[in-house]
Amino acid sequence: MKGQVSAEMLILLAVVIAIVALAASALMNTAQDSRDAVTDRTNDVLTNTNDVANCRACTTNGDCGSGGTCTDRCCEP
């Protein structure tokens, strides 16, 4: 009969939809993990940039003036 859908076709359609749903769920979880990793790395970079921006550059203790010490290329009081 024209226009009828067999039970096998309905089962196959249900299986395909389930597989697509599982794949979408896995992709969403991967995207969430990636977003969290990028956020963490961005925060690390911004923190380090802020530390560098607040640093008075030096190579020796003499660059820091009297009483200052050069630590990790930044003058410390």
Image: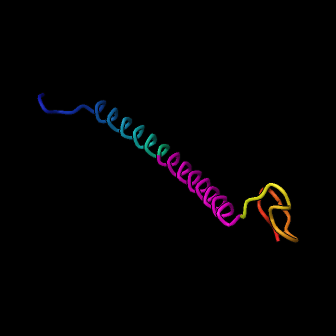
Dominant secondary structure (helix, strand or loop) of the stretch shown in magenta = helix
Q: Left of 56 or right of it: where is 12?
A: left
Expressed as whole percent of the image width and height from the top left, the position of residue 67 reads 88, 71
Q: Residue at the spot x=53%, y=52% of the render?
A: 35
Q: Left of 5 or right of it: where is 45?
A: right
In the depicted structure, whether residue 18 falls above or below residue 50: above
In the depicted structure, whether residue 28 falls above or below residue 67: above
Q: Is residue 5 magenta?
A: no
Between 44 and 55, the one nearer to me in the picture: 55
Expressed as whole percent of the image width and height from the top left, the position of residue 1 reads 12, 28
In the depicted structure, whether residue 68 falls above or below residue 6: below
Between 26 and 57, the one nearer to me in the picture: 57
Quadrant of the image containing the C terminus: bottom right
| Quarter assignment of residue 15 | top left
Q: Residue at the spot x=58%, y=55% of the render?
A: 42
Expressed as whole percent of the image width and height from the top left, the position of residue 12 reads 34, 32
Q: What's drawn in magenta, residue-wise?
A: 28-55
Q: Residue at the spot x=45%, y=40% of the render?
A: 23
How was this image coloured?
A: rainbow
Residue lying farthest to the right in this orientation: 67
Q: Is residue 52 magenta?
A: yes
Residue lying farthest to the left in this orientation: 2
| Quarter assignment of residue 43 | bottom right
Q: Left of 36 or right of it: where is 21?
A: left
| Quarter assignment of residue 4 | top left
Residue lying farthest to the top in this orientation: 1
Expressed as whole percent of the image width and height from the top left, the position of residue 54 reads 68, 67
Q: Residue at the spot x=85%, y=68% of the render?
A: 68
